[in-house]
């Protein structure tokens, strides 16, 4: 598959503009074959096999002369170079990188991104998909499905296996790809193997991405992988790195809603503290149901401290037993939720959870970790930590345990963060759902 630029001056029956999805796709060697650009500057980019590339003869019908070369929504223009001059209807294109793009999570996520569900119905995007040599052919299949879906907001798709190429100028990097935990593998081994992946991706982001790129780490163990990534990207603000704990928050909201007998949109102010592991702390102390503190609605303290907490911590493992596979669709939904929480203003009085850098936090949590904490956003992609939260002995004890685990993980990957020789003294094996 190579990329060709084709003249749009066809008859309506040969290439109707509304039947095209506008994107480009690249092979691992990133070669391009281009035909001369049309004089009017309009460009249509399609992915086709090299033996299919043909230069059709331009045909100027009477209809084309009167209506131009656009039909319907495409008259707004998809020419990126002329976009600002010709229309104010579309926002400036944003570049989004996704690693592990041929995997199950991405198979759900990419179509949500391309549809406008995440960044809005007037936000054109370019998708840059990172895979491996083994997954390159599957990436081409993903690109074909995106092409056939005719998303008008999707302007471009690039595929590749080199993060230094794929991450060029990206403004969002969604790092999903990571190796699963194999039989007999110690958790320290998983930290090392996946840590090397995220160290390399951090270096690539540091070298070629936008200076204000927002990075969402999904691949597990995501908190420590995010720390490794940010440590290898010193030119990018550490505040821009997130570890995904939104799925845990969503699971906690679901359980509280079920217990209270309300729909989940009545549950707010839910925080997941700490690590995305079985030491995570779903916070019911600060959570609310219909604006009322959870402990005033659900008076069963034993259920909150034991059954509720354990259900959220172990939900992924139970799902694997039922479904035979780790969560993919719900993970993709939680990535969407996490991004939207950063690009839309947080509702008044509410907050959301994200694994973020602890430096300067108001809770007394050890610095230089990536730790899930409550955040608010003005909708500009940035966030601030929530200060108006309370702690009791139970919550503080659980948060401290998760903090100790992350400090141990940090020592285990010191060789990947530039902090010396790794020393692995993990207090226990809190196996993450889906690691095995």
Image (cartoon, rainbow, N blue to C red):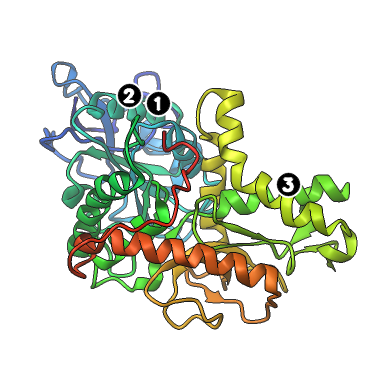
Determine crowd level at label 2: few under 14, some 14-19, many 20+ residues with C-alpha closer than 10 A: few
Quadrant for the N terminus in the image: top left
Could you tell me how far apart the alpha carbons at marks 2 and 3 are, in whole angstroms?
Answer: 35 Å
Between 148 and 135, the residue placed more toward the observer is 135
What residue is pinned by disc 1? 145
Residue 91 shows up from this direction: yes
Q: Quadrant of residue 317?
A: top right
Is residue 57 left or right of 87 when viewed as pictured?
Answer: left
| Callout 2–callout 3 Cβ contact below 8 Å | no
| Callout 1–callout 2 Cβ contact below 8 Å | yes
Helix, strand or loop for disc 1: helix
Helix, strand or loop for disc 3: helix
Mark nearer the N terminus (2 vs 3) = 2
Residue 244 image point, x, y percent: 48, 54
Determine the residue positioned at 14% across, 16% down.
51
Determine the residue positioned at 66% across, 47% down.
310
Q: Which mark is residue 141?
A: 2
Q: Which mark is residue 254?
A: 3
């Amino acid at each position: 598959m190579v990329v060709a630029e084709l003249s749009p001056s066809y008859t309506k029956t040969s290439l109707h503009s509304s039947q095209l999805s506008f994107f480009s796709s690249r092979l691992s060697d990133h070669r391009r074959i281009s035909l001369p650009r049309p004089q009017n500057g309009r460009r249509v980019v399609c992915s086709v096999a090299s033996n299919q590339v043909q230069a059709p003869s331009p045909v100027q019908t009477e209809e084309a002369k009167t209506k131009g070369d656009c039909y319907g929504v495409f008259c707004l223009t998809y020419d990126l170079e002329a976009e600002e001059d010709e229309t104010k209807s579309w926002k400036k294109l944003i570049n989004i990188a996704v690693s592990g793009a041929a995997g199950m999570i991405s198979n759900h996520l990419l179509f949500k991104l391309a549809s406008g569900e995440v960044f809005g119905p007037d936000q054109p995007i370019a998708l840059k998909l990172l895979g491996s040599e083994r997954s390159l052919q599957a990436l081409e299949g993903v690109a074909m499905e995106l092409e056939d879906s005719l998303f008008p907001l999707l302007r471009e798709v690039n595929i590749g296996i080199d993060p230094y190429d794929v991450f060029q100028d990206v403004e969002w990097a969604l790092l999903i790809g990571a190796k699963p935990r194999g039989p007999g593998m110690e958790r320290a081994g998983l930290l090392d193997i996946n840590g090397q992946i995220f160290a390399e991706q951090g270096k690539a982001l540091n070298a070629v991405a936008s200076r204000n790129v927002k990075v969402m780490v999904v691949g597990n163990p995501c908190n420590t992988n995010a720390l490794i990534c940010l440590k290898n990207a010193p030119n990018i603000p550490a505040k821009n790195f997130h570890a995904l704990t939104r799925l845990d928050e969503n699971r906690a909201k679901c359980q509280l809603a079920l217990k209270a007998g309300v729909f989940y949109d009545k549950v707010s102010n839910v925080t997941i503290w700490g690590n995305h592991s079985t030491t995570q702390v779903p916070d019911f102390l600060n959570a609310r149901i219909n604006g009322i503190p959870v402990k005033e609605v659900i008076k069963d303290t034993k259920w909150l401290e034991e059954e509720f907490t354990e259900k959220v911590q172990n939900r992924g493992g139970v799902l694997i037993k039922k479904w035979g596979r780790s969560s993919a669709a719900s993970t993709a939904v939680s990535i969407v939720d996490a991004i939207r929480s950063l690009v839309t203003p947080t509702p008044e009085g509410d907050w959301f959870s994200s694994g973020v850098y602890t430096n300067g936090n108001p809770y007394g949590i050890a610095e230089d970790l990536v730790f899930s904490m409550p955040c608010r956003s003005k909708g500009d992609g940035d966030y601030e930590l929530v200060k108006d939260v309370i702690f009791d002995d139970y919550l503080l004890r659980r948060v401290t345990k998760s903090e100790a685990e992350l400090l141990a993980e940090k020592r285990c990957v010191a060789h990947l963060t530039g902090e010396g020789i790794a020393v692995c003294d993990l207090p226990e094996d809190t196996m993450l759902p889906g690691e095995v």
